[in-house]
Image: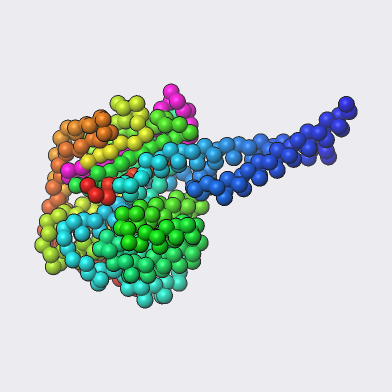
């Protein structure tokens, strides 16, 4: 066998392998339920922290707006349509900044509508969310299959919560992995501020201790939010203004005392459940609450107008 | 000329092969986690991922609200039990580690009060030397 013949055979083998792999790669793209861009690395290693690395430079969790809506319902507070962003505002959103941050706002509103079983309005909000996601080129997170599932489950509050939360998780993942986390953090910010707006406004008329605690407990999540948005401070005037407003709000939250007492947790191994018995108590004054309410309202106006 | 094409193709084949293997592994990790994120648990709407080597530790800060039940899910690679995670309160008291329970992929937590916590996660080097660590957080809809 000549050298040329060997090379030719290896060449044919290589081409076959490449085509074979490409074929299966494409096939997987159609069949898998998760996006195929998982392999992209967008993590940053914090070289200043010995042996500690952080997700995306900083790994900070922002609470789901659904939890706030569930609390409001649990406290038997009546549905109030004034708490949600009117849909007519959404036609004014032309920049990606406004679209992304209001995608978060509308997600929070949808949670509120869904929990209070406001189905006809919820359908309209979901439709607008879908449109905004298309405009932001993340419609794969709200694809046809998801929309069909939402349509089918519009009357089923539990299923809807799961479907929509998973869609937002996929959007978060998609944006992080495509170096578009500048939009991902806006979605989180929109959801956070909208739910904070709801509880601070409701607290003006309803004296509910749980509501008050939940407002004070946003102190740490707000700090987390500032940490994840701060890398984008110079991206545009909108980012700068939003960051400044959040930092200003954090000064007022800083005045809130959270008294913490450690207690040993108890473990139920059979059910894989640990009960955290430690206690914390939030101390918020009326003056602090009033200032926070006003500042949150201003941030929300900046976002939704 | 023929040799150059051959080298390029062999390199390309290897690259695509490696890329497909990595993607398939990460997909499996995602599936390992999402199978535990099912009703009544709802995603917090975020997905946390880090590339870790040996004894590197991923750290993240989270507030758990009182009166809620949460599920923490962590995995790496294609099998369960490759991740060790520890939950500390803000005073660095250890509240939980799955190392005490065979590196369980998930664990549930009931909070009577709202607590600011730090979760540290790392690969169990007996099983994995490096890889993507994926963590998901869910909360129970009806406590």
Task: Provide the residue span drawn in magenta.
Answer: B111-132
Q: Where is residue A1 in the image (x, y as percent from the top left)?
A: 88, 26
Q: Quadrant of residue A88?
A: bottom left
Q: Position of residue B55 (x, y in %)?
A: 41, 29
Question: Do we see residue B3 in this rendering?
Answer: yes
Q: Does the magenta stretch include residue A42?
A: no
Q: Position of residue A183 (x, y in %)?
A: 43, 59
Residue nearest the viewer, comparing B77 with A150? A150
Report the residue at 44% width, 61% height from top. Answer: A147
B97 sits to left or right of A95: left
Question: Do we see residue A186 in this rendering?
Answer: no
Q: Where is residue A214 in the image (x, y as percent from the top left)?
A: 19, 54
Report the residue at 44% width, 55% height from top. Answer: A171
Report the residue at 34% width, 54% height from top. Answer: A159
Residue nearest the viewer, comparing B66 with A56? B66
Q: In which quarter of the image is residue B3?
A: top right
């Amino acid at each position: 066998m000549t050298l040329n013949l060997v090379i030719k055979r290896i060449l044919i083998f290589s081409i076959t392998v490449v085509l074979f792999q490409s074929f299966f790669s494409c096939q997987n793209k159609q069949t898998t339920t998760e996006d195929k861009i998982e392999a992209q690395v967008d993590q940053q290693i914090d070289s200043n922290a010995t042996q500690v690395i952080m997700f995306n430079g900083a790994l900070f969790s922002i609470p789901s707006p659904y939890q706030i809506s569930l609390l409001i319902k649990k406290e038997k507070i009546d549905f109030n349509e004034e708490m949600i962003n009117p849909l007519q505002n959404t036609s004014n959103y032309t920049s990606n900044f406004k679209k992304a941050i209001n995608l978060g706002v509308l997600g929070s509103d949808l949670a509120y509508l869904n929990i209070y079983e406001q189905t006809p309005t919820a359908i309209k909000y979901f439709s607008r969310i879908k449109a905004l996601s298309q405009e932001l080129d993340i419609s794969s997170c709200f694809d046809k299959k998801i929309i069909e599932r939402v349509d089918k489950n519009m009357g089923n509050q539990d299923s809807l919560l799961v479907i929509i939360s998973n869609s937002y998780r996929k959007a978060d993942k998609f944006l992080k992995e495509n170096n578009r986390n500048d939009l991902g953090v806006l979605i989180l910010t929109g959801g956070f501020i909208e739910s904070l707006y709801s509880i601070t406004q409701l607290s003006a008329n309803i004296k509910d201790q749980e509501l008050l605690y939940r407002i004070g407990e946003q102190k740490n999540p707000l700090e987390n939010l500032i940490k994840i948005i701060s890398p984008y401070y110079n991206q545009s005037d909108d980012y700068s203004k939003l960051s400044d407003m959040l930092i200003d709000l954090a000064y007022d939250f800083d005045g809130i005392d959270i008294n913490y007492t450690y207690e040993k947790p108890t473990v139920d191994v059979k059910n894989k459940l640990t009960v955290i018995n430690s206690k914390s108590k939030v101390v918020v004054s009326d003056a602090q609450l009033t200032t926070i309410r006003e500042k949150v309202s201003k941030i929300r106006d900046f976002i939704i107008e | 000329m023929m040799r150059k094409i051959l080298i390029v193709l062999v390199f390309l084949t290897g690259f695509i092969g490696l890329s497909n293997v990595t993607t398939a592994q990460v997909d499996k990790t995602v599936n390992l986690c999402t199978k535990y994120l099912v009703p009544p648990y709802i995603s917090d709407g975020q997905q946390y991922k880090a590339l870790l080597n040996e004894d590197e530790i991923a750290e993240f800060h989270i507030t758990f609200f009182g009166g809620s039940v949460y599920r923490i899910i962590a995995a790496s690679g294609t099998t369960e039990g490759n991740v060790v995670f520890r939950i500390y309160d803000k005073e660095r008291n250890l509240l939980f580690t799955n190392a005490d329970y065979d590196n369980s992929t998930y664990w549930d937590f009931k909070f009577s009060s709202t607590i600011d916590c730090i979760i540290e996660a790392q690969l169990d080097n007996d099983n994995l030397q490096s890889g993507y660590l994926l963590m998901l957080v869910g909360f129970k809809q009806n406590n």
